Each structure stands twice: as structure tokens, then as C-alpha cells.
Amino acid sequence: MWQYGQMIILGIETSCDETAISVVKAEGGLEDLRFEVLGSALHSQVKMHEEFGGVVPMLAKREHIKNLPPVLIEALRKANLIFNSEFSIFNSENPGIDMITVTVGPGLEPALWTGIKFAEELGQKWQVPVIPANHMLGHIASVLFELESTKAQVKKRVEFPAVALLVSGGHTELINIKSWAEMEKVGETKDDAVGEAFDKVARMLGLPYPGGPQISALAEKARQESIQQENKFPRPMLHSKDLNFSFSGLKTSVLYYIKNLRNTSENISQVKKLEIAREFEDAVIETLLTKTKMAIEKYDPKTLIIGGGVIANKALRENFLKLKEIYPDLEILIPEKSLTTDNATMIAAAGFIEYLKGGKETELKANGNLDIN
Ligand code: KG4
Ligand code: ZN
């Protein structure tokens, strides 16, 4: 059924609190990658971790083990690779998968292992290779998909050199990308990741986990109603010459500011929450923009890629797209909203890139601190 050069890839992602599986058709080489999503499914554990105010690794592991089989069946069904209800994961024939790719890091190791073990079992049963994928490469590759045109052939090329800003719950990094086969981390956070700062500030305001969307909604409302805090929070490391970030100082400023408020009033008023959310978000945006501009000046890229859960933030997206006014020749690529947060579609793409690079020899072993290269 499939033409020569095409591959049907099953991507598996369990690095944090989303159990995700995606079936992606991949073709082309490193110079002309082409992907099409055939079917994907995702089970989020966010509700379960919410009561603990963050992801609990052992609970995440248990949930992944429970949810991987039904998520797989849903993804295969959506991809029209299985049709009846009799499909049983380890007793049925290979439904048409040529290769499996699974996230091996970075992430929570107990969670990562569940995906790896599942992938290995499937790989043995179906007699297909299992390729390890880097989660951060996945966030970069997430810009290669155009979901609106679902079934149409998608050609989204990245012109190199490129710079990527990755902003998620666990990472804040700048990557200098010479090609899909050659990239290096050139800046990172010295303490909290930006998503983590969003989550912690949200908790200070009594908002549920994950805090990013909560803060984002408050900040948006504040802007609409022209509500602004007089007191400015610091923009950490703005004047340092390197491309590193730091968000713990900003987080602490918010904490002290809130503590001060409580000296006079028991609860933070809604207006204060709006003010704080907006001022915090503005500080984050300014910091991310400034460091990204420094990276652009330094590496003179043709493309800027922004990936990771935090770029779901509307104000951040808008501000980054405005960089076009300063750098008219710069292509700015931001993933479709559903591909900003963790998903397996991007892992299928990252695995295919690894495969083309010849990364087949890499160990299938969870590495919580896996670097990008
Ligand atoms: O990439 P991701 O799904 O998971 C990791 O690999 O960490 O990112 C999750 C992070 C969380 O910290 C969440 O609060 C943040 O992304 N996030 C946002 C928004 N949506 C999700 N942060 C700011 N604004 C948002 N709209
Ligand atoms: Zn992620």
C-alpha cells in the first residue's frame, strides 16, 4: 500500500504527565522531511496530579502503565489501521507499523521507562525497530506539522541555520541549529524553567496546576481591562551577556510581594491577582524576548523556532510574532496549539530524524537529563 520511501511510524510519549501515541506517515530525507498525522490519541493525567500541585512521578508511572494499551488502540483506530474491537495488543499481527519511536529523555525516569518497556514489547511482537527519541528534539520538530490541512501533503521546510527557544515545564533553552543533524544548546535556565515559574506563581495565587493557562487567562483579562501593577517585578539576567535565563528571583519577588499584601489583607483581591499575573507574565515575556534577540544577533538564523508548552501562551506568541518587524527576513515558526504541549506526534518526527541520522545504535534507556545534540 505504501510507496517506497514512506514509513509508518508509531510515536510513544510518556516523559511527564501525558500518555500519548501517534501514528505518523514520514517520508523524505533530512533535507526534505515530510510528515502526515494519520491518527493520534492522548490521555492527560493533569486532573490527577492537580491535587498534589504538581506531577508525582510514581503516580505518573502507574497511570502510564494503565493507559498505554487503550491509548494505543485509540490511535491505531483513528489511523484506520484497526477496525474491529477484537484487536488485542500483544496477540494481534502488526497493524502496518514500520517503526516505533519512544521518548527516552529528558523527563521523569519512572515515567519514561513505562513508554520504553511498552515500545520494546511491541517492537518484538511486531518485528519492527524501536528508535529512541529526544523529547526536546520533539518540541523543535513540532513545527513541521500543519494540522489544519490534515490529510493534505504537508511540506513545511525549516531553512537553516535556525535558532530554537524551548519553553516548557522542565526546560528553558536556546538551541543553535545548523541542520537537523547538528545542533547545540547555547543557553539554559540556571534555576527554574519558565513553565515551572508559571506553575509556582499560580500556586501562590491559589490557582490549580498547571498554572500556565490560569496565569495566562488572568493576565489577558488584566490587559483587556487595562489593569496594571505599579510595582515592577525584576527581569532577571536581562543584562547578563550570556544566553542563560533565571526565573527563581522573579518567582521570589512575586512571593514577597504577595506576603506583603497579606500583612494588610487576609486574601488577595481579584484585582490584585490580575495585576500580579500580568506583571509576572510581562516580566517573563521581556526576558525571553531579550535573550532570544541576543541569540538572533549572535547566530544570524534564517528561522526562529519556538516550542514547548509555554508557547501556548497567547501574549507570548503575539510578542514573538512581532519580532518579524525587527527581523523581516526571519521565518518564525510556532507549532499548532495542540502540538505545543507534550504529544507523541512530535516524538514520531524526532524519532524519524534520529533514524535518518543513523541513531539506531543508541541505547533504549531512560535518561532524565538527556541533552540535545
Ligand atoms: O511542554 P510541556 O507540555 O511539558 C513539559 O515538557 O514540561 O509544558 C508544560 C508547561 C507547564 O508548566 C504549563 O504551566 C505551561 O507549559 N503552559 C503555559 C501555558 N500552557 C501551558 N504557560 C503559560 N501560558 C500558557 N498558556
Ligand atoms: Zn515537553
Image (cartoon, helix red, strand yellow):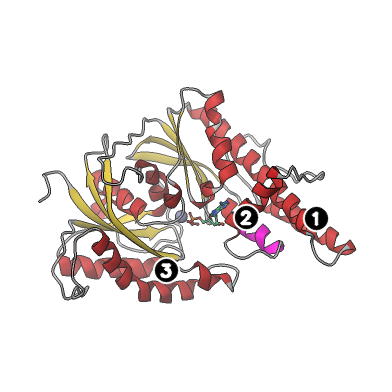
Q: Quadrant of the C terminus?
A: top left
**In the image, the residue with mark 1 has its CB under 8 Å from the nearest atom of ligand 1:** no
- Report the Cα–Cα distance between label 3 and label 1: 36 Å
> Earlier along the polypeptide chain: callout 3 or callout 2?
3
Figure check: 87 above or below 186: below
Q: Is residue 197 above or below residue 152?
A: below
Tell me the element at label 2: helix
Q: Position of residue 201 (x, y in %)?
A: 68, 58
CB of residue at label 3: within 8 Å of ligand 1?
no
Let me know if residue 81 is in the magenta part.
Answer: no
Give the amino acid at mark 1.
Tyr
Mark 1 vs mark 2, CA separation in Å: 16 Å
* Foreground tag (3 vs 2): 2
Q: Residue at x 69, y 43 (%)?
A: 223
Q: Find the distance from the CA under tag 3 to the CA under tag 2.
A: 23 Å
- Dominant SS of magenta comes to helix
The residue at 46%/27% (across/down) is 330
Residue 203 within the segment the image draws in magenta? yes
Q: Which residue is mark 3?
A: 111
Residue in the picture at 66% in, 63% down: 207
In-front residue for pair 189/60: 60
Which amino acid, mark 3? Ala
Circle 2 residue: 198
Identify the magenta region: 197-204
Is 257 placed above or below 303 here?
below
- Residues under numbered marks 3 and 2 in contact, where contact means CB atoms less than 8 Å apart: no
| Residue 313 percent location from the top left of the image | 56, 47
Residue 257 circle label: 1
Picture quadrant of residue 156: top left
